[in-house]
Image (spheres, helix red, strand yellow):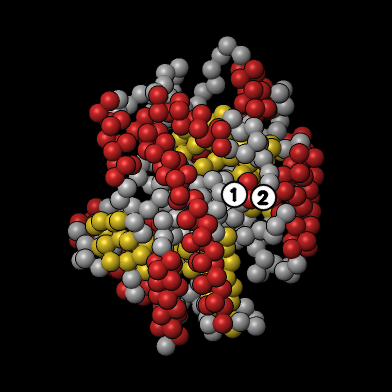
């Protein structure tokens, strides 16, 4: 398998030659929070795949829901005025639970195309309003919004930009709220004030009549699990209303119990104008994403388009099998999984905070089942781990050998996003195996 992979399967994010040298790691099976590789080595999946298998692996009821739908109706397009029962029911169930009046749902295949879709919807919205000049988009440094061309431009990670003239000329960034290394210090109110001032300044610079929307993740995931201070989302939401620009919450990682509730925006007590989700929506069993649109945004597009259709859609939008899985996953979340996630998340955060005294740990942050440990070589100076001396891959490998899958970001940040089904024992094992991995890294 390793030879076949080397010869034929492309893994762009893994750096081509480095990946070929190290060889692929092949997973064979999984149950609950445990994954098993091709050699039989068992690990706790501390990252739920790619922060997506929120429900955990091996739920027969999900498999049955998919199989039933495949037998009955494996495909119906959501492209034209056609549909299927599971897609319609899932849209209704989601609208019922979404914050505020986010009552209209557009299904995609994942997160990147959900983000792309918001850009198209927003442009249609402003055309319908007779404000076509509002075509500039702002997002945050350290943000991640996908790797499609539009999404990658909103994403702030340079590795996604090289060679493409990105970000595109209508995509702009303001600094992140990243508290551990923030030029304004760690005071929450100062961080909020700095973000408010930065967005205000960027909108003034571009001209409010040209700015369409501001994008933020409730917690920045791929940038290193950066949790904004309490009140940050609300301050930015309110500022967007004041400046007459739309606020888009990208909940692709934070949605579906990752931080506790079904949507992290509920923690923040805000209602965005649009919201993107994916990952936990189908818990990784099949691909699906969903864009939520407020009454105002959807209604304006629908009225503005009048009798004509607006051109947007994917062959697999509103896929009935994905929707059937989404319905079953939602039922599982609400039959105890969300509750367990809250309990397990508190234990995870407490356990990781206990690691703060470890000589390599500079910062521990997170909320619920979404957390990170930032490693440093000098705590007082917050000196990052030298990437050449301790490549993320070596820490990842050590954790793997210790029976733990984590995400080791290149900048010395270890990411955690375990399945919500974790038992106390599994959470304790995640902490213990992390401690062992850090001790081995010190040696
Ligand atoms: N937005 C956010 C916040 C994400 O974390 C991701 C994926 N990590 C995406 C969008 C893109 O989703 P996908 O990989 O499903 O296209």
Q: Give the residue drawn at x 69%, y 60%.
A: 229
Find residue 53 and report its horizontal and vertical position in percent.
Answer: 40, 51
Name the residue carrying label 1.
Answer: 264
- State whether residue 18 appears in this view: no
**Foreground pick, 142 / 293:** 293
* Disc assigned to residue 268: 2
Q: x%, y% of residue 92?
A: 51, 29
- Looking at the picture, does residue 310 appear above or below residue 178? above
Which residue occupies 53% across, 31% down? 105
Picture quadrant where residue 191 is located: bottom right
Residue 40, quarter of picture: bottom left
Q: Residue shown at 78%/40% (left/top)?
A: 243
Q: Residue at x 55, y 32 (%)?
A: 95
Residue projecting furthest to the bottom = 443
Residue 359 drawn at (x, y percent)? 54, 84
Q: Position of residue 263 (x, y in %)?
A: 57, 46
Q: Secondary structure at mark 2?
A: helix
Numbered tag placed on residue 106 in the rendering: none
* CB within 8 Å, label 1 to label 2: yes
The answer to whether residue 190 of the structure is visible from this angle is yes
């Amino acid at each position: 398998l390793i030879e076949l992979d080397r010869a034929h399967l492309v893994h762009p994010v893994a750096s081509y030659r480095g990946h070929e040298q190290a060889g692929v790691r092949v997973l064979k099976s999984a149950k609950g929070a445990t994954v098993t590789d091709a050699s039989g080595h068992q690990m706790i999946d501390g990252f739920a795949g790619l922060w997506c298998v929120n429900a955990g692996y091996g739920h027969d009821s999900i498999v049955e829901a998919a199989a039933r739908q495949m037998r009955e109706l494996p495909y119906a397009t959501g492209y034209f005025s056609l549909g299927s029962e599971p897609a319609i029911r899932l849209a209704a169930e989601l609208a019922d639970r979404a914050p505020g009046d986010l009552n209209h749902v557009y299904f995609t295949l994942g997160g990147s195309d959900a983000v792309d879709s918001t850009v198209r919807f927003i442009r249609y919205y402003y055309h319908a309003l007779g404000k076509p000049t509002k075509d500039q988009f702002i997002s945050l440094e350290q943000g991640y919004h996908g790797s499609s061309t539009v999404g990658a431009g909103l994403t702030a990670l340079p590795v996604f930009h090289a060679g493409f003239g990105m970000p595109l000329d209508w995509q702009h960034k303001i600094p992140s709220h990243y508290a551990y290394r923030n030029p304004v210090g760690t005071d929450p109110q100062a961080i909020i004030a700095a973000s408010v001032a930065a967005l205000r300044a960027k909108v003034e610079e571009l001209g409010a009549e040209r700015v369409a929307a501001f994008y933020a993740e409730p917690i920045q995931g791929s940038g290193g699990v950066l949790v904004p201070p309490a009140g940050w989302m609300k301050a930015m939401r309110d500022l967007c209303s004041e400046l007459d620009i739309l606020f888009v919450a990208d909940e692709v990682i934070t949605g579906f119990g990752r931080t506790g509730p079904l949507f992290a925006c509920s923690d923040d007590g805000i209602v965005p104008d649009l919201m993107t989700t994916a990952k936990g929506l189908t818990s990784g069993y099949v691909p699906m994403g969903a864009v939520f649109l407020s009454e105002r945004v959807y209604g304006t597009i629908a009225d503005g388009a009048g009798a004509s259709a607006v051109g947007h859609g994917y062959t697999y939008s509103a896929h009935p099998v994905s929707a059937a899985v989404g319905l079953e996953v939602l039922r599982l979340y609400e039959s105890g999984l969300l509750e367990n996630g809250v309990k397990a998340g508190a234990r995870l955060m407490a356990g990781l905070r206990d690691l703060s005294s470890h000589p390599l740990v500079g910062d521990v942050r997170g909320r619920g089942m979404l957390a990170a440990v930032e490693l440093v070589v000098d705590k007082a100076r917050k000196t990052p781990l030298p990437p050449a001396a301790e490549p993320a891959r070596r820490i990842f490998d050590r954790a793997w050998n210790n029976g733990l899958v984590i995400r080791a970001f290149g900048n010395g940040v270890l990411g955690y996003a375990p399945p919500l089904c974790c038992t106390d024992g599994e959470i304790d094992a995640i902490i213990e195996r992390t401690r062992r991995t850090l001790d081995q890294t010190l040696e």
